Image (cartoon, rainbow, N blue to C red):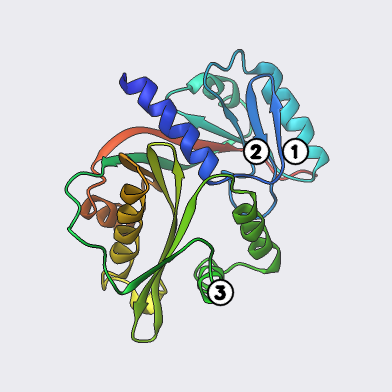
Amino acid sequence: MSDLEQAWRVEEACLNAWPSPRELLVNGYLLRAAGGRSKRQNSITPMRGSGAPEPAIEAARVIYGCLGQRAIFRIPAIAPQMESLCAHGDDIVVDETCTLIRDLNGLPAAPDPGVAVAAAPAPDWLALRDTVNRADSAAAQVFRDTIAALALPRAFAAAAAESGIGAIAFGVLDRELLVIEAVATPEPLRGRGHARRAVGALLHWGRAEGAEAACLQVVAANTPARALYSALGFERELYRYHYRVGPEPE
């Protein structure tokens, strides 16, 4: 598999692991409009083999405007064709993000017994994510709708700490790839290794379920998170993407 083919394989797995309950295909581009604050779930992104972007860009501005949302364009380096067209408007560039991968050889012999791994998130798992993300009721519901929309095997990890849950994360298995999502640690417990334990447990789960590699996406400027993932073996970067965000609708 070439580097480009692997990048597209990972890109598609990451989209599958964070679905939007409301999606449209527009001239070979995927338009998502979940509501809430997630740009990934509220942007238009090129798919493998997408053609000319002009019709999709024009349609996106109209559709998002009708929905009362700003137009957001997600531009992966493996499909940069929207960049020059969006660059001449009022859109601003935000959130450069790295896509990282590691194989699942060389994991420790056994997972951490202090991390619970379940097929569905428990109420305290969801409550912790809401708190860490400062989610209002609407954003909390969008996340629950996202979980409900998953069509692939998934696992939710909660690392135990003295005061309750020290960190959470979930993983989605897309054939040979495990996608890591939603890693979160309460602020008072950061820097104690809880997130590393939670993600490590998911790596074990994925390998046991047949995954050959794990991937994730992290904002390039998030130095603590990148250090965490590097320590977990995510040292190979496949590609980056960023967003161009349009003005708020009138």
Q: Quadrant of residue 250?
A: top right
Q: Quick check: 171 above or below 82?
A: below
Numbered circle sitting on residue 127: 3
Secondary-structure class at tag 1: helix
**Which residue in the protein does label 2 denote?**
246
State the residue at coordinates (36%, 57%): 202
Furthest residue in direction top, as rendered: 52
Q: Amino acid at mark 1?
A: Tyr
Instruction: Name the N-terminal-most of marks 2 and 3.
Output: 3
State the residue at coordinates (40%, 48%): 219
Residue 201 can be seen in this image: yes
**Which residue in the protein does label 1 denote?**
64
Q: Amino acid at mark 2?
A: Gly
The answer to the question of whether label 3 and label 1 lie on touching residues, with beta carbons closer than 8 A, is no
> Dividing the image into 4 quarters, which one contains the N terminus?
top left
Q: Quick check: 79 above or below 244?
A: above
Instruction: Left or right? Give the position of 242 relative to 43.
Output: left
Mark 1 neighbour density, 10 Å: few (under 14) some (14–19) many (20 or more): many
Q: Amino acid at mark 3?
A: Ala
Residue 211 placed where, x, y %? Answer: 35, 42
